[in-house]
Amino acid sequence: MPRINLFQVLYEVIVNMLDTKVALDACLRLLLNEYDIEEVDAIPRVKPQPHVRIWKVLIPALVAGKAEDIEAYILFPLEFPYSMPCVILLDDRFIHLPHISLKTRTLCLYEEGVIYDVNNIEGIIRDNIEKTRKWVELYYGRDNTEEYTQEIRNYWNEQYDGETIVDDCWTLSGDIPSKTCEMTGMVYAKKNLRDDETQAMFLVSSDENDHTIAYIRKHYERKDLPVLYIASLKIATMPPYYITGQELITRITDEDDQNIFKKFINKHNHGYVLFPIGLGYALGGVHICRLNVNRPGFRKGALSPFSVLTKFENKNKKLERLYISIFNEQRIAMRTCGELMNEKSFLIAGLGSIGSNLCYYLNGYNNAKFSLIDNDWLSVDNIGRHLLGFESISQYKSYAVANFLQQYRPDRETKVFCSNLQQLGDEIFNKISAIFVCTGDVTSEKWLLHKMSEGSIQIPAFMLWLEPYGISGIMIYLNPNDKDSINRMKRKADDRFLDYCLIKREEYDCGEKLTSKDAGCNGRYALYSANDITMFLSAIFPYIDQLLEVPTESKCYRWVGNLNIAIEKGINLVSLSDLSKGMVQELPA
């Protein structure tokens, strides 16, 4: 590996920065003919940040119909021109206009990911100045309600007039309630992987039997919370969006909801109130801390929590605000492919190296259910090519893979059977979309073919395995309506499907050449790598996807793998002509 010359790297950084400074100085001399520009070292009341240059620019604009020079600061970051300059306005008249950060006073003038000519530094600066002028003239002195409504998420999450930061560590599992109701709520601790700090996470649902709620209850220490959703609470139409104790009551527009809230707060003395903010994927909320009902000058019990909330210091005290993200299958679908896919239910038998990694691919369907079958546990020897790793050692593979899938999507239905394929009842099979048999066990495959032949199992099935050293990978697709091919497959199973293998049958008859055995171990195992599994499944999965959507007659697919290893080890193959690594051959059933 070549040595890195740190001096050379530092030199190049300095040269690039000097080049940028030279270009900016040249632009400054040019723009001074048109604008009043002063180079400054810092921006008042703004936290210092690394930069190449800072300019204070007076930009002529019409403000509410009157010509003015607007004072703007343009900060050129170290990455300029590969990052846009920051335009900062300190004038308090513009503080609550759209597309400006309340905290940093920085304008958002461009869409994320905008493409521009990094070589045209003068053009970049002129465009920022012109966009700033247009922004002031467009938004100042007019009704911007529609702008706030369209981007309520950004404005809701700002801090207004000394508020605490908006707590966005909240998730609602399931659908937004259609009417006012109490919700199941809980807080649980989660470790931040960056700094090892413990972070409080909040989860709510209108369904106490929600799968995600059940998952958190099973895997985390948690504390239940009083949570009320109020459907009729209306937030302000424009910033600032802070809410006081008294304002919370007045913003509840339905009298019945006001009474429900009054009973809720009097019962719990504190709690969390959630409400719509005009988004289908998020809610707003406030946290009402425990209220002091025992005050000097009042008899015990004379004050209710509701009266304390709307009087004394709480009347005008800003409540801590919340931002709650919606987690359900529809939201996930809209943020991925844009729609919910047709529901699929998969049964995977054998959760070793092939079966576990196949689950990763099948998990890409945004509306999938899983039934997992395996009665073995994960050992240290397995983790080199298994989906799971060190954390899952000594766990049953079926439960460990289920946990992986539920960590990814706890709302999904995942069933576990710590058994073998033959022990399952027929009724389980015919409730699913497809069976995947990855056991590497011919007995299980024979049993499946027998069941399909007699008509007990009437759903599509896939059987997958890799040949030793990853020389090839085999996938057999079985259409339950293609009875002739099912019967032919039964006969091929008696011959261990050797007709489909790339390695000649005589090599299998002398099995020691193809497998390894640890000292004292009763079983032998085939050698192939995790990379071989990835290459095989990534090549074959497009065929699986197509067959799930449009069934065909039964057939076999053979992926061509490590031909070079076969040649090196003198392993005889059926054919080498016209074969290349990565190709997939289609063979008749």
Image (tube, helix red, strand yellow):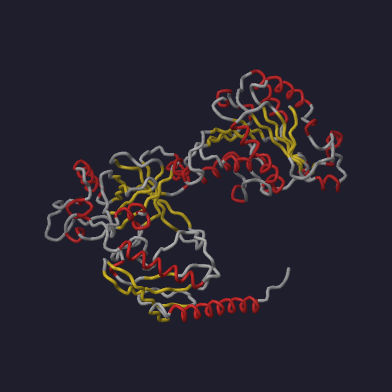
Q: Position of residue 40 (x, y in %)?
A: 41, 81
Q: Position of residue 29 (x, y in %)?
A: 47, 81
Q: Is residue 8 left or right of residue 223?
A: right
Instruction: Pick the residue in front: 357 or 589.
Output: 589
Is residue 82 depicted above or below 440 in this figure? below
Instruction: Pick the residue in front: 171 or 134.
Output: 134
Is residue 43 depicted above or below 376 in this figure? below
Residue at (67, 22) in percent of width and height = 482
Q: Is residue 67 left or right of residue 154?
A: left
Residue at (33, 48) in percent of width and height = 278
Residue at (29, 71) in percent of width and height = 67
How many tags in the picture?
A: 0
Residue at (73, 39) in percent of width and height = 584
Q: Position of residue 533 (x, y in %)?
A: 69, 44
Residue 321, quarter of the rendered image: bottom left
Residue 537, quarter of the rendered image: top right
Q: Is residue 375 left or right of residue 23?
A: right
Instruction: Pick the residue in front: 202 or 563.
Output: 563
Q: Is residue 241 left or right of residue 46?
A: left
Q: Quadrant of the N terminus?
A: bottom right
Is residue 272 depicted above or below 455 in this figure? below
Q: Position of residue 262 (x, y in %)?
A: 21, 46
